[in-house]
Image: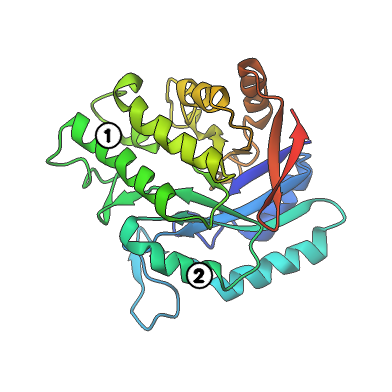
Amino acid sequence: MLADYHVHTEFSDDSVYPMEQVVEDAVRLGLDEICFTDHVDYGVKDDWGCGKEVVYRQGEPLANVDYPRYVEKIQRMQELYGDRIAIKLGLEFGIQMHTIPRFEALYKRYPFDFIILSVHQVEDKEFWTQDFQRGRTQKEYNERYYEEMLNLVDSYQDYSVLGHMDLIVRYDKMGVYPFEKVKPYVEKILKRVIQDGKGIELNTSHHRYGLADTTPSREILQLYHDLGGRIITLGSDSHRPEHLGAYIKEAKEVLRAMGFCEFCTYEKMQPVFHTL
């Protein structure tokens, strides 16, 4: 069973990968299931059709998903390709504490199968631009990142898994901050995730970003396992054809070596377990 549960298309502000091409590529690659998880980042982006002028970045519209068109197109893909591949409706919620009400409202509007909770910004400051890190020590921005994540899992429930849990590592110009220094935050987060019946993902994009460890790190994955975590999804975080399905088989091997026996797909926000 091969499933890619972190897939972006032209409906994300940072991708131009046509949805139907994604499906055709997934079939060609032998994937059994995919879940579309395009970006929503309230606080730094507006919705399509909100009445405001759309801002463009590098020629692409800087806006959240056009939800009606997105849902309609996924349903169309399910009709056209459902006999060859399972296709699920998801989104990647880039949540901050002050944007929770907007995500609560969005979640109620559509019949989602799967939601990734990601921390892409804190205080409306982006990591990739270094705006969030600027003016903070490495200790301060790492601790603030995990503090926001802990507050979120304590406050918000309409999600399936935590996405790329140690994303801050990707944008840390000071190098990898020692895990032991953030372990108290991570352990509290994971315990709450497990208590609430949620999960985490193993995101294979660490390969293309040239990171020395998995995303999240093997230390976080092992801690999750040792705390009793069972719900884990596999996702390439694809934005281009060459990303789709990449290293999913290898990710399964990583999990097996740590003692995991299963991975998950989702149906109507409920985990479905598969043998690794």
State the image coordinates of residue 146 (x, y, percent, origin top left): 33, 38
At label 2, the amino acid type is Leu
Quarter the C terminus occupies: top right
Closer to the camera in the image, 135 or 14 = 135
Q: Earlier in the sequence, mark 1 or mark 2?
A: 2
Count of numbered badges drawn on the protein: 2
Q: Residue 103 appears in which quarter of the rendering?
A: bottom left
Question: Going by the image, does 8 lie left or right of 124?
Answer: right
Tell me the tag on residue 142: 1
Characterize the local packing of mark 1: few (<14), some (14-19) or many (20 or more) Cα atoms within 10 angstroms. many
Q: Residue furthest left?
A: 135
**According to the image, label 2 marks what residue?**
106
* Helix, strand or loop for disc 1: helix
Tell me the tag on residue 40: none
Asked whether the viewer can see residue 164, the reply is: no
Which residue is at 45% across, 56% downward?
156
Asked whether the viewer can see residue 203, the reply is: yes
Q: Residue furthest top?
A: 257
From what the image shows, is residue 193 above or below residue 81? above
Distance from label 1 to label 2 (Cα)?
29 Å
Quarter the N terminus occupies: top right
Question: Going by the image, does 225 lie left or right of 25?
Answer: left
Which residue is at 61% across, 59% downward?
18
Which residue is at 40% across, 37% downward?
167
State the image coordinates of residue 53 (x, y, percent, origin top left): 33, 78
Closer to the camera in the image, 194 or 231 = 194
At label 1, the amino acid type is Asn
